[in-house]
Amino acid sequence: MYIIIIILQNIDPTTQEEYEKLKEEVKRMIMDTTDAPVQKLNLIDTLQKLCVAYTFEEEMEDALQKIYNDCDIDHYNDLHTVSVYFRLLRQQGIKVSCDVFEKLKDVDRKFKSSLINDVQGMLNLHEAAHFAIHGEDILDEALAFTATQLKSMASRVSTHLVEEINHTLKFPIRKSVPRYEAKFFMSTYAIDNSHNKTLLKFAKFDYNIVQVRHQKQLSDILK
């Protein structure tokens, strides 16, 4: 189910002022140096999926570079963290090695069967695998593994997760249209009990403001 977002006809001063306040609050969250690496990765991941990352490019670049320089990813064994770490750094152009996924394999050099118990982790591994470059066999294997397992999960998970699985398989981040994905992610993020109200509110404001700007540009073209 998608969130119904009311498109504003004009950006009134009060709306613009609240938007700017929220933007500054989100910026402070990104720049907060007290956050653990996992918290920061999850924050940036959420901002990207909400399609507001473009507003904080410099702050996010600094944060991700710091994570790359200071965080020893070998200390993290959970599927979600390793996958998000890899994808975000690859998206940023940082040359992180696909060897970070070796720990997820068993003695037979296959992905551990226990991984399938982590649905969100599998979704993130699937997204990460799309950022493979030629010759990275482990990511090709990860893509095939996650696609097969996620499809089989559809018969035994909640309706909400079925929608998320189907959407991820059809529209992986690397091949998707950000603004379209923002609408879908806002709808799924809103029903997550752990969602950050500030991030969601800012994303809705940003979506509406961008829509107004696009409408005005179209009106100018048609004049």
Image (cartoon, helix red, strand yellow):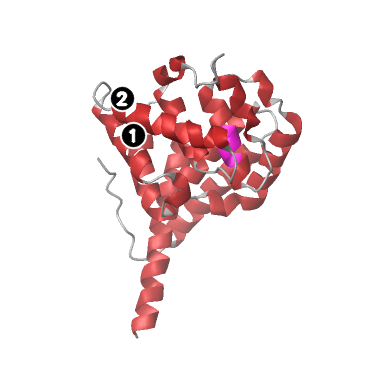
Magenta span covers which residues? 84-88
Q: Residues within 10 Å of mark 2 (few under 14, many from 20)?
A: some
Location of residue 163 (image quadrant):
top left
Q: Quick one: 127 or 200, which is closer to the camera?
A: 127
Mark 2 to mark 1 CA distance (whole Å) = 9 Å
Q: In the image, is 177 to the left or to the right of 61?
A: left
Q: Quick one: 11 or 122, which is closer to the camera?
A: 122
Q: Is residue 140 magenta?
A: no
**Farthest residue toward the bottom?**
223
Asked whether the beta carbons under mark 2 and mark 1 sit within 8 Å of each other, the answer is yes
Labels 2 and 1: the sequence-earlier one:
2
Q: In percent of the image, x 65 and y 26: which residue is there?
A: 36
Specify the quadrant that holds the C terminus. bottom left
Vertical side of 30 occupied by 104: above or below:
above
- Say if residue 194 shows up in the picture: no
Q: In the image, is 121 to the left or to the right of 101?
A: left
Vertical side of 210 occupied by 76: above or below:
above
Q: Determine which of the numbered discs, if any, sits on residue 153 in the image.
A: 2
Q: In percent of the image, x 41 and y 20: which residue is there?
A: 116
Q: Amino acid at mark 1?
A: Ile
Q: Residues within 10 Å of mark 1 (few under 14, many from 20)?
A: many
Q: Position of residue 193 (x, y in %)?
A: 38, 26
Residue position for label 1:
165
